[in-house]
Image (cartoon, helix red, strand yellow):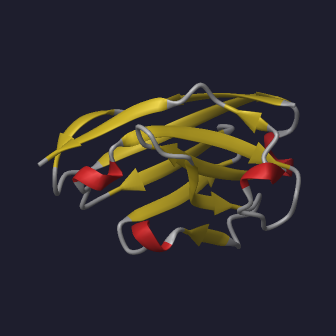
């Protein structure tokens, strides 16, 4: 498995931006599809974005298309989530995750998870 540590969360006003980072260690980072998920209070964990090892494939949830961008730097073993035009409904704990399944967005395919970072968007 790969170990994951998220950072970059915080409090931001609606319309603002944040960039989340996820640092990986352990097994070869570049072998994995990396994903971001989020969980709002009282709700289930939901898919946000994912990217394959080369960056040639990426997927985003409809709710964040045009606002969030996932990217990765394999040399730094880090994946990023740039979040722009944030809305109060984006408030959640954001989790980084890794999967050995190609081009997946299914939560059950992600076997390694970080501890999460809180993102709060005020109106």
Q: Position of residue 52 (x, y in %)?
A: 74, 62
Position of 82 relative to 57 (above/below)? above
Residue drawn at (41%, 62%) of the image? 68
In the picture as drawn, the residue positioned furthest to the front comes out as 42
Residue 8 visible here: no
- Which quarter of the rendering shows the N terminus? top right
Q: Position of residue 119 (x, y in %)?
A: 35, 37
Residue closest to the eye, 110 or 85: 110
Residue drawn at (82%, 40%) of the image? 111
93 sits to left or right of 99: left
52 sits to left or right of 100: left
Residue drawn at (46%, 30%) of the image? 117
77 sits to left or right of 42: right
Q: How many marks?
A: 0
Residue drawn at (44%, 39%) of the image? 42
Position of 59 relative to 26 (above/below)? below
Q: Position of residue 74 (x, y in %)?
A: 70, 46
Position of 57 relative to 47 (above/below)? below
Q: Position of residue 94 (x, y in %)?
A: 49, 40
83 sits to left or right of 39: left
Residue 46 visible here: yes
């Amino acid at each position: 498995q790969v170990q994951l540590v998220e950072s970059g969360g915080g409090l931001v006003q609606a319309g603002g931006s944040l960039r989340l980072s996820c640092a990986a260690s352990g097994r070869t980072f570049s072998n994995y599809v990396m994903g971001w998920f989020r969980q709002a209070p009282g709700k289930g964990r939901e898919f946000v974005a994912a990217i394959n090892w080369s960056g040639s494939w990426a997927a985003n949830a409809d709710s964040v298309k045009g606002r969030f961008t996932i990217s990765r730097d394999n040399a730094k073993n880090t994946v990023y989530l740039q979040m722009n035009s944030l809305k109060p409904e984006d408030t959640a704990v954001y989790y980084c995750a890794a999967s050995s399944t190609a081009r997946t967005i299914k939560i059950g395919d992600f076997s390694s998870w970080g501890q999460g970072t809180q993102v709060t968007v005020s109106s």
